[in-house]
Image: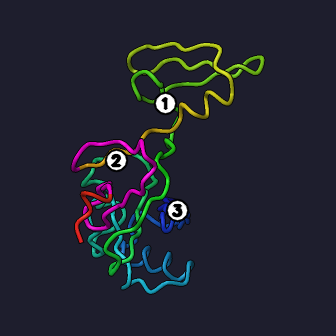
Amino acid sequence: MSQVDFIYKTITTTIECNKNEKMKDICQKFASKVNIDKNSVNFLYEGIQIKEDLTFEKLFNIYNRNQNKMVVIVNLKNQEDKTLTTSKMKYKNIICPKCGDISKIKLEDYRISLYECKNKHVINNILINEFEKMQYNDLICNECKKTNKNNFEFYICNTCNLFLCPICKRP
């Protein structure tokens, strides 16, 4: 059995499916489960609009995936942009604060150690509250490359998924 994780309004909804099932049917199951009109949203996989006539397996083969899980972003069609009010985003995986690559974690005596990132960094004796701060990254405007030091709102374009500051946001 395969599964598709749909992320809609920051909530993840998992739909189980067969490899030969068409994406339009899988997307319809999701829409029914969260009670939305399937035609009012876009379904994006790897940043590209899903071709609903493809099967789960065919879409996976396009991107050379060897797993049975797919993550799909769901956006409202008629929403030009949405505001992101935080200045930081939390990483999905445990990351090395030196290089930003995925790292392994070890917890011992209320201290955290990070090790085995791609650059072989080892960081020992991290306090829990320090570790939490390390797992966030500053948002950077994709246009002007400024970070959010002044706590202004960022916008995420639903068309191209760029992070934009208020100055670079186009009307």
Residue for point 41% across, 69% down: 74
User: Farthest front residue?
Assistant: 150
Pointer 1 and pointer 3: residues touching (CB < 8 Å)?
no
Q: Which mark is residue 10?
A: 3
Query: Is 147 inside the magenta-drawn segment?
Result: yes
Distance between mark 1 and mark 3 Cα atoms: 21 Å
Dot 3 surroundings within 10 Å: few (below 14), some, or many (20 or more)? few
Q: Which mark is residue 95?
A: 1
Placement of 87 over or under 131, stated as above or below: below
Dot 1 surroundings within 10 Å: few (below 14), some, or many (20 or more)? many
Q: Give the magenta range.
A: 143-165
Q: Looking at the picture, which amino acid does disc 2 mark?
A: Arg
Residue for point 51% across, 13% down: 122
Identify the element where label 2 is drawn.
loop
Residue for point 48% across, 18% down: 116
Q: Looking at the picture, which amino acid does disc 1 mark?
A: Ile
Query: Is 152 inside the magenta-drawn segment?
Result: yes
Dot placed on the residue nearer the N-terminal end, 1 or 2 = 2
Identify the element where label 3 is drawn.
loop
